[in-house]
Image: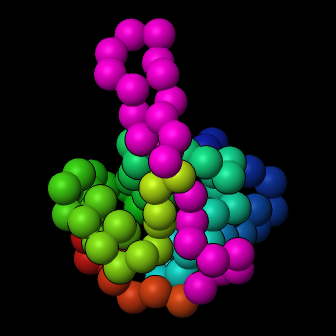
């Protein structure tokens, strides 16, 4: 997470409270659907979680929890990078933000 400098008035505490709220929401809901496009690779989703939470997540457990619990679904399409293997594209299941409790300590 990038550190911010000193802001005017109480804006540093406002930013800190907003970040804490986002961390909580990210771990307990599917709010991450608003931080990515409609289709994404799992590494992009994991990067969002790691950036906001400020810690590394185990790749296999992260994927297992999200896919196994039906939170994200494969689209059947692949993204072809300039270099390397194609990556499976995923999307969030459902169309709204849902409450989940499986990521509280991934």
Query: Looking at the picture, does residue 69 appear above or below residue 58?
Result: below
Q: Position of residue 30 (x, y in %)?
A: 56, 75
The image quarter in which residue 95 lies? bottom right
Which residue sits at x=54%, y=81%? 29
Q: Position of residue 19 (x, y in %)?
A: 58, 66
Task: Give the camera-side residue of 79 and 49.
Answer: 79
Q: Which residue is situated farthest in the top direction here?
A: 82
Relative to residue 67, is residue 34 drawn left or right?
right
The quadrant of the image that shows the C terminus is: bottom left
Task: Give the camera-side residue of 39 and 6.
Answer: 39
Which residue sits at x=37%, y=69%? 66
Relative to residue 83, is residue 23 drawn left or right?
right
Query: Looking at the picture, does residue 18 appear above or below residue 89?
Result: below
| Total marks in image | 0
Q: Is residue 85 magenta?
A: yes
Q: Which residues are magenta?
A: 76-98
Q: Position of residue 94 (x, y in %)?
A: 63, 77
Q: Is residue 103 magenta?
A: no
């Amino acid at each position: 997470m990038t550190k911010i400098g000193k802001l005017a008035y109480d804006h540093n505490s406002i930013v800190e409270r907003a970040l804490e709220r986002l961390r909580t929401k990210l771990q307990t809901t599917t709010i991450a659907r608003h931080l990515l496009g409609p289709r994404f690779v799992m590494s992009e989703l994991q990067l969002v979680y790691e950036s906001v939470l400020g810690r590394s997540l185990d790749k296999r457990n992260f994927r297992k929890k999200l896919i196994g619990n039906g939170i994200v679904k494969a689209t059947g399409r692949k993204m072809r990078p300039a270099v390397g293997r194609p990556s499976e594209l995923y999307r969030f299941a459902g169309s709204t933000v849902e409450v989940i409790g499986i990521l509280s300590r991934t």
